[in-house]
């Protein structure tokens, strides 16, 4: 039985920061789901704030590396999806407030 | 599903010189402005020299540098032959300087400079078409690149014909060809490129989502058709066609502005950074330019046309480009120098990588300078015009300094 929880995966991904806005991917609401199999293989389902994001490939790699650092993590797969499309309502309140308040993050 | 591989991104040492030289030639063109008076005829060789210094030396150099980076992002494929960009910059830079010398000093130089510029642009356009052929997607931005590059080829061919006509190699009606040339380059290439790229870049930087793209599609089609009609009308010297083309282009620009308004209403990121300020000034200038242009078409004096062109070139094009430089250049530097360090050590955020005070100085000197200079042109007042040009020159110094600082960040 694998002891890695979905929360642990989200916690690991929260170390990945979007360099443009300065918030981590979890508080931005970009991580839709994390499926942990019994073998401890992990599948992360996420999106990006912009479809044409030039960092697409790198962000995917950072997420994969962050999850691979969890003890006993097996094969990590990251799927970037565009449905549902991301919007600001998916972000945490602190992100919404900081962006709407015009403060550099 | 798509992925932008790190392999698609051209190296910083290929792109950085475009931005540094573009900023330097912007400064040169602002210095040169001081030598002009508020009253002139746009067909004067001295004016044509300045326009080419600004549009080729600054606008085209920066657009080509930005396209080296953005074409793979937009098309989601790598360049067909990215190394050609190493050839494009020297050809374009040296060709521009020889052309400007041709306008200002010795007309015989025009065709030599023109040939170098022509070569650089043909290489750019063919490389872009070859890359387009590899792309599997067909968004509006992709369509924009295809159409705007076609106009670029038409614009440079007419421009080269003018250069040959001016030094007496061939016999053509320079005035007729000049209209076709200006419209193909400014409306067909520069405006359509800005329209296409802004649909990708502005929502990306403002975090606006879920907006209707119908207005920009209509705007794009109308501007593309309008420019074509003016181009043909100018070549066959048919006024009615040119008027129809002007009207269609203005309506198209109106749709574009409406699209920008829709995106602005959905903007999540309210921070008034240098980019946002520059966008406000740039789009405000475009609106002003359209209003002044319409007043001119209704029968006002040439000074209204000059002021309209001033706000279009310096206010709209200048600020849209300069504003985006403070987003694009830090990203390029970060991608090259800091992306490999993510997860290993603390890396800077993008907004920490541009000098805010210098950027603000650039904005205030340039915006006040543009406004004063425009007022000087409208009122044909040399003191106001030269005051504006002087402030623009100081703004140009701050642009160059901040560009150098951004490019050397983390070196």
Image (cartoon, coloured by chain):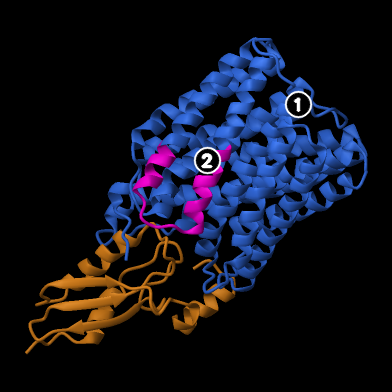
Image mark 1: chain: B
Q: Which residue is located at x 71 percent, y 27 percent?
A: B177
The image quadrant that residue B171 belongs to is top right
The part of the chain drawn in magenta is B127-151
Of labels 2 and 1, earlier in sequence is 1
Q: Which residue is located at x 65 percent, y 28 percent?
A: B52
Residue sitting nearer the eye, B222 or B370: B222
Residue B142 lies in the magenta-colored region: yes
Q: Residues within 10 Å of mark 1 (few under 14, many from 20)?
A: some
Q: Which residue is located at x 43 percent, y 48 percent?
A: B71
Residue B128: percent from left, percent from top: 43, 41
Nearer the camera: disc 2 or disc 1: 2
Magenta region's main secondary structure? Answer: helix
- Quadrant of the image for the N terminus of chain B? bottom left
Q: Secondary structure at mark 2?
A: helix
Q: How many marks?
A: 2
User: Which disc, if any, is residue B47?
Assistant: 1
């Amino acid at each position: 039985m694998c002891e890695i929880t979905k929360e642990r995966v989200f916690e690991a991904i929260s170390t990945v920061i979007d360099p443009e806005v300065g918030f981590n991917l979890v508080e931005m609401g970009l991580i839709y789901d994390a499926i942990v199999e019994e073998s401890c293989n992990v599948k992360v389902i996420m999106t990006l704030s912009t479809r044409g994001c030039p960092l697409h490939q790198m962000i995917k790699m950072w997420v994969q590396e962050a999850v691979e650092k969890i003890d006993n993590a097996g094969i990590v797969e990251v799927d970037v999806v565009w449905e549902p499309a991301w919007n600001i309502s998916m972000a945490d309140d602190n992100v919404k407030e900081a962006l709407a308040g015009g403060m550099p993050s | 599903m798509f992925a932008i591989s790190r392999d698609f991104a051209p190296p910083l040492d290929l792109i950085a010189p475009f931005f540094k030289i573009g900023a330097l030639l912007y400064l040169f063109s602002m210095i040169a402005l001081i030598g002009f008076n508020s009253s002139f005829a746009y067909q004067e060789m001295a004016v044509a020299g300045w326009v080419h210094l600004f549009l080729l030396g600054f606008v085209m150099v920066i657009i080509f540098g930005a396209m080296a980076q953005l074409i793979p992002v937009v098309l989601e494929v790598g360049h067909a032959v990215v190394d050609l960009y190493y050839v494009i910059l020297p050809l374009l830079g040296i060709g521009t300087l020889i052309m400007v010398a041709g306008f200002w000093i010795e007309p015989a130089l025009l065709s030599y400079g023109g040939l170098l510029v022509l070569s650089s642009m043909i290489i750019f356009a063919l490389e872009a078409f070859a890359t387009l052929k590899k792309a599997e997607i067909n968004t509006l931005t992709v369509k924009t690149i295809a159409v705007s590059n076609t106009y670029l080829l038409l614009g440079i061919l007419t421009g080269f014909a003018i250069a040959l006509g001016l030094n007496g190699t061939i016999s053509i009606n320079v005035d007729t060809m000049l209209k076709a040339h200006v419209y193909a380059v400014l409306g067909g290439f520069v405006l359509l490129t800005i329209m296409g790229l802004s649909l990708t870049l502005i929502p990306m930087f403002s975090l606006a989502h879920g907006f209707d793209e119908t207005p920009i599609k209509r705007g794009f089609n109308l501007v593309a058709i309008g420019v074509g009609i003016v181009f043909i009308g100018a070549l066959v010297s048919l006024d009615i066609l040119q008027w129809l083309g002007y009207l269609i282009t203005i309506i198209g620009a109106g749709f574009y502005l409406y699209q920008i308004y829709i995106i602005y209403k959905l903007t999540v990121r309210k921070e008034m950074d240098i980019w946002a300020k520059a966008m406000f000034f740039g789009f405000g200038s475009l609106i002003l330019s359209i209003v002044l242009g319409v007043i001119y078409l209704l029968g006002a004096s040439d000074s209204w046309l000059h002021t309209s062109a001033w706000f279009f070139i310096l206010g709209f094009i200048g600020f849209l480009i300069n504003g985006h430089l403070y987003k694009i250049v830090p990203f390029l530097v970060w991608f090259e120098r800091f992306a490999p360090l993510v997860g290993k050590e603390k890396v800077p955020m993008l907004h920490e990588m541009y000098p805010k005070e210098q950027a603000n100085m650039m904005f205030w000197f340039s915006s006040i300078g543009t406004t004063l200079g425009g007022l000087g042109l409208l009122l044909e007042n040399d003191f106001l015009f030269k005051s504006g040009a002087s402030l623009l020159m100081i703004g140009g110094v701050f642009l160059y300094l901040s560009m150098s600082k951004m490019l050397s960040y983390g070196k």
